[in-house]
Amino acid sequence: IVHGIPEEDVPMGAACVAMVEAAASGVACSTDPNRPRGTSLLINSAWGLGIGTVGGSVSPDLWEVTKAAPHRILKRRAGSKETRVLSSPAGGVETVPVPRDKCSAFSLEDGQVAELARLVCACEAHYGRPQEVEWALDAAGRFFVLQSRPLTTSDREGAAEEPPPELEGHGLLLQGTPASAGSGAGPVFPVLQLQDLESFPQGAVLVARHSSPQFVKVMRRAAAIVTDIGATTGHMAS
């Protein structure tokens, strides 16, 4: 019995979901997962369907936006967006190259970023806790909230602080977007194909072309994970 209604009195229902022909889509976090006590939210966006962003095959555009209206943009960075996932006329989806002039072009305008930020904050207010929101923008410029679920935030001590300073004797080589706060070290273990995960050693640093939810299999053994392509809002990062 649920809410006083016997299970045998409820017929089985069929959910009908409208498909969105997305011009752009992505994931937004109503607070920075690595700075849960901060006052900004994060938006990731890429051309086409959101599969590339959540699966880790695309480096999406990034915006950091104030949670307080009028949702001022604090930081923006264009992703590489070399491919996009589209609906296939034959059914299913297909991955196609992005035209060169759109690879480095932002997939959302500033006004759209502010509108999306308002929707994300409304989701957080409705559910009463930080949210991770999957969304899509159709060709007519209308936003659709596809899913809103509780956001996993870092529980590391000091997660809301700035990144640690450079380690003495080790110069900074590259900068990127963190999925998990902290520092890690160990022997480099390149993962060129998923079969490589079977021999992943304890305490190694996983290095790969792009992030993948499959890496969760070795996450407890890895000292760190570094990828060329991916996003804070991808499934592996979550």
Image (cartoon, rainbow, N blue to C red):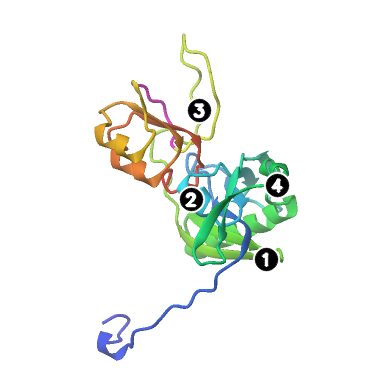
Whole-angstrom CA distance, mark 2 to mark 4, is 25 Å
Q: Can residue 172 be spotted in the picture?
A: yes
Which of discs 2 and 4 lies nearer the camera? The answer is 2
Q: Give the number of the disc on residue 163.
A: 3
Q: Earlier in the sequence, mark 1 or mark 3?
A: 1
- Whether the residues at callouts 1 and 3 have beta carbons within 8 Å, the answer is no
Left or right placement of residue 104 versus residue 28 in this view:
right
Whole-angstrom CA distance, mark 4 to mark 1, is 21 Å
Near-viewer residue (125 or 190)? 190
Residue 68 is one of the magenta-drawn residues: no
Q: Label 2 belongs to which residue?
A: 54
Within 10 Å of disc 2 (Cα), the crowding (few <14, some 14-19, many 20+) is many
Amino acid type shown at disc 4: Arg
Q: Earlier in the sequence, mark 1 or mark 2?
A: 2
- Most frequent secondary structure within the magenta stretch: loop
Within 10 Å of disc 3 (Cα), the crowding (few <14, some 14-19, many 20+) is few
Amino acid type shown at disc 2: Val
Residue 181 is one of the magenta-drawn residues: yes
Q: Give the number of the disc on residue 72.
A: 4
- Whether the residues at callouts 2 and 4 have beta carbons within 8 Å, the answer is no
Image point 42% across, 49% down: which residue? 152
Magenta residues, as a range?
180-186
How far across and down, in percent of the image, does residue 187 sit?
A: 34, 20
Within 10 Å of disc 4 (Cα), the crowding (few <14, some 14-19, many 20+) is some
Badge 3 element: loop
